[in-house]
Image (tube, rainbow, N blue to C red):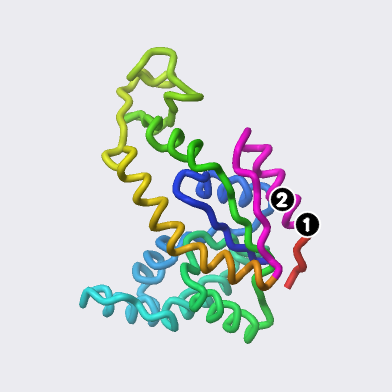
């Protein structure tokens, strides 16, 4: 089984991808990690992708799809893959589906993490991170015992420069414009499952695993 994980900035995709990986034995593959691995290992497709990047050009879809297929055939993907950050467009989605079908494989389900905009904004603008141990806190629902000090190691807490209202509003606008066509594409295929992304991490993971039981294996 292969699944695609969708969700807006702050929806918790990274957290849930890690939790799903542990719960299912599937392999979480983020698009950026896939690129870096192919380029670092110097695979033919990795070198080809690097040539485009060196010239400041976008890597063509067929090269990206080739790297995806190259990655999913590796032994650590034998139990299935959780795609995160790819595909980004309906065109890429169709190309991925066709390429997988040519290898007797498919996308079984697309899980869309849904969190209301107000909650997303609180998650982002309230986020504080420890400089030492990288523990994460939130002003609204997971505040440290002492403001600006990490409970775990006593380190200083800081906010990322892009964790502000203006930036998150822009990121949400970009996400909506880019992702809604992709959501519609998978809705038409009947494999989109909308997941309530609010609540305890384990509760959200359980909802996602439940949705996966409704999907058809490849």
Q: Residue at x 60, y 38 (%)?
A: 198
Q: Residue at x 65, y 64 (%)?
A: 80
Front residue (pair 102, 133): 102
Q: In the image, is 12 to the left or to the right of 55?
A: right
145 above or below 48? above
Please state, as top left, top right, bottom left or bottom right, where the C terminus lies in the image.
Answer: bottom right
Q: In the image, is 209 to the left or to the right of 102?
A: right
Circle 2 crowding by C-alpha within 10 Å: few under 14, some 14–19, many from 20: some
Residue 187 location (% of width, % of height) = 65, 67
Q: Tell me the quarter of the picture where residue 78 sits.
A: bottom right
31 above or below 104? above
Q: Residue at x 65, y 42 (%)?
A: 204
Q: In the image, is 11 to the left or to the right of 39?
A: right
Q: In the image, is 82 to the left or to the right of 126?
A: right
Whether pointer 1 and pointer 2 mark residues with C-beta atoms closer than 8 Å, the reply is yes
Circle 1 crowding by C-alpha within 10 Å: few under 14, some 14–19, many from 20: few
125 above or below 217? above
Residue receiving disc 1? 213
Residue 39 location (% of width, % of height) = 35, 71
Q: Is residue 204 magenta?
A: yes
Front residue (pair 97, 197): 197
Residue 110 location (% of width, % of height) = 63, 62
Q: Tell me the quarter of the picture where residue 160 sits.
A: top left
Q: CA distance from mark 1 to mark 2?
A: 7 Å
Front residue (pair 47, 10): 10
Front residue (pair 1, 186): 186
């Amino acid at each position: 089984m292969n699944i695609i994980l969708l969700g807006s900035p702050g929806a918790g995709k990274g957290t849930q991808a890690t939790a799903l990986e542990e719960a299912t034995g599937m392999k979480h593959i983020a698009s950026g990690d896939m690129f870096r691995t192919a380029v670092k290992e110097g695979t033919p497709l990795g070198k080809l992708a690097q040539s485009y990047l060196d010239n400041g050009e976008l890597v063509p879809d067929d090269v990206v799809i080739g790297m995806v297929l190259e990655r999913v055939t590796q032994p650590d993907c034998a139990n299935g893959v959780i795609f995160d950050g790819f595909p980004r467009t309906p065109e890429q989605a169709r190309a991925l589906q066709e390429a997988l079908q040519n290898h007797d494989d498919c996308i079984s389900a697309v899980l869309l993490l849904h969190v209301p905009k107000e909650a997303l904004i609180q998650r982002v603008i309230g986020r504080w991170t420890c400089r030492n141990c990288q523990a994460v806190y939130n002003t609204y629902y997971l505040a440290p015992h002492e403001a600006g000090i990490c409970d775990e190691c006593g380190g200083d807490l800081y906010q990322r420069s892009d964790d502000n209202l203006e930036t998150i509003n822009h990121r949400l606008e970009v996400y909506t414009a880019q992702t809604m066509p992709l959501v519609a594409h998978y809705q038409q295929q009947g494999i989109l499952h909308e997941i309530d992304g609010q609540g305890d991490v384990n509760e959200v993971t359980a909802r996602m695993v439940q949705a996966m039981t409704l999907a058809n294996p490849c």
